[in-house]
Amino acid sequence: MLSEYQVLELVQKEIGKMRYDREQYINSGRASDFSDYQHVCGVILGLNHADNMIKDLVQRMENE
């Protein structure tokens, strides 16, 4: 069975993969229009927030 830290690490890796895919989508110019670009940027922002929340959670767990 995975520890809490291992689970959070796996989630962070998946977030990183998702963020990378969307960044590549934007960088390659594949956004069909400005609305699509804004949407993908919003997804990236949400993934960044999720990653930061996990980092904060791990830090709190380590301080307990």
Image: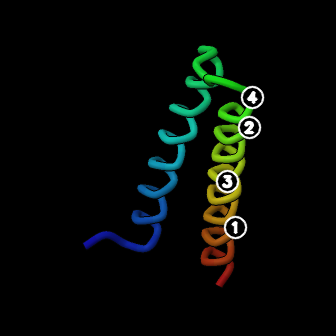
Name the residue: 46% across, 67% down. 5
Instruction: Assign the N terminus to one quadrant of the image.
Output: bottom left
Residue 55 placement (x, y as % from top left): 65, 61
Report which residue position mark 3 lands on: 46
Name the residue: 63% across, 15% down. 29
Residue 46 placement (x, y as % from top left): 67, 53
Badge 3: how crowded within 10 Å, few (<14), some, or many (20+)? some
Report which residue position mark 4 lands on: 34
Residue 62 placement (x, y as % from top left): 62, 74
The CA distance from mark 4 to mark 2 is 6 Å
Above or below — where is 30 with respect to 36? above
Is mark 4 in CB contact (under 8 Å) with mark 2? yes
Where disc 4 sits, the SS reads helix
The label on residue 56 is 1
In this view of the protein, which residue sits in the foreground, 60 or 41? 41
Where disc 2 sits, the SS reads helix
Where disc 3 sits, the SS reads helix
Is mark 1 in CB contact (under 8 Å) with mark 3? no
Q: Quadrant of residue 38?
A: top right
The CA distance from mark 1 to mark 3 is 15 Å
Q: Who comes first in sequence, dot 1 or dot 2?
A: 2
The CA distance from mark 3 to mark 2 is 12 Å
Q: Who comes first in sequence, dot 1 or dot 4?
A: 4
Q: Nearer the viewer, mark 3 or mark 2?
A: 2
Q: Who comes first in sequence, dot 3 or dot 2?
A: 2
Where disc 1 sits, the SS reads helix
Report which residue position mark 2 lands on: 38
Question: Type of residue at label 3?
Answer: Gly
Above or below — where is 58 with respect to 64? above
Most extreme residue toward the left, as rendered? 1
